[in-house]
């Protein structure tokens, strides 16, 4: 377990064709250790969804890729994923 999140930030794509990102942070109040999760969001077609761990770099910074059709603009309007 990474911990409960203290904050989340939305990082919009820097330009056309770029990937938006969610960044979660948790700072342990006892030790002061900071852990971060960066999640890259990809719009894909039906049945191409996946959630994958990419790497831990630097230490306590975890990178994931999330691919899902509901990450496409209005692809899952009115539905929860």
Image (cartoon, grey):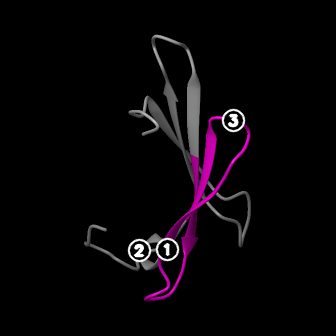
Tell me if 62 is positioned left or right of 72 in this view: right
Position above or below: 34 against 68:
above
Q: In terms of sequence position, does the residue under pointer 2 or pointer 1 come before the other? A: 1
The mark tally for this picture is: 3
- Compare residues 53 and 24 and report the one nearer the observer: 53
Which part of the image, by quadrant, shows the N terminus?
top left
Secondary structure under tag 1 reads strand
Q: Is residue 59 above or below residue 15?
A: above
Residue at (41% x, 76% y) in the render? 74
Q: Nearer the viewer, mark 3 or mark 2?
A: 3
Q: Which residue is mark 2?
A: 70
Q: Is residue 51 left or right of 15 when viewed as pictured?
A: left
Q: Is residue 51 above or below residue 64?
A: below
Residue 80 in magenta stretch: no
Foreground of the two, 53 or 25: 53
Q: Is residue 20 left or right of residue 58?
A: left
Q: CA distance from mark 3 to mark 2?
A: 31 Å
Q: Secondary structure at mark 3?
A: loop
| Residue at mark 1 | 50
Q: Earlier in the sequence, mark 3 or mark 1?
A: 1
Residue receiving disc 3:
59
User: Which region of the structure is painted magenta?
Assistant: 38-65
On screen, residue 37 above or below 76: above
């Amino acid at each position: 377990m990474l911990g409960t999140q203290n904050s989340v930030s939305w990082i919009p794509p820097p330009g056309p064709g770029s990937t938006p990102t969610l960044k979660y942070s948790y700072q342990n109040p006892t030790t002061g250790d900071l852990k971060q999760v960066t999640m890259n969001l990809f719009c894909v077609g039906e049945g191409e969804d996946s959630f994958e761990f990419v790497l831990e770099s630097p230490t306590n910074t975890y990178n994931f890729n999330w691919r899902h059709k509901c990450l496409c603009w209005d692809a899952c309007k009115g539905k929860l994923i």
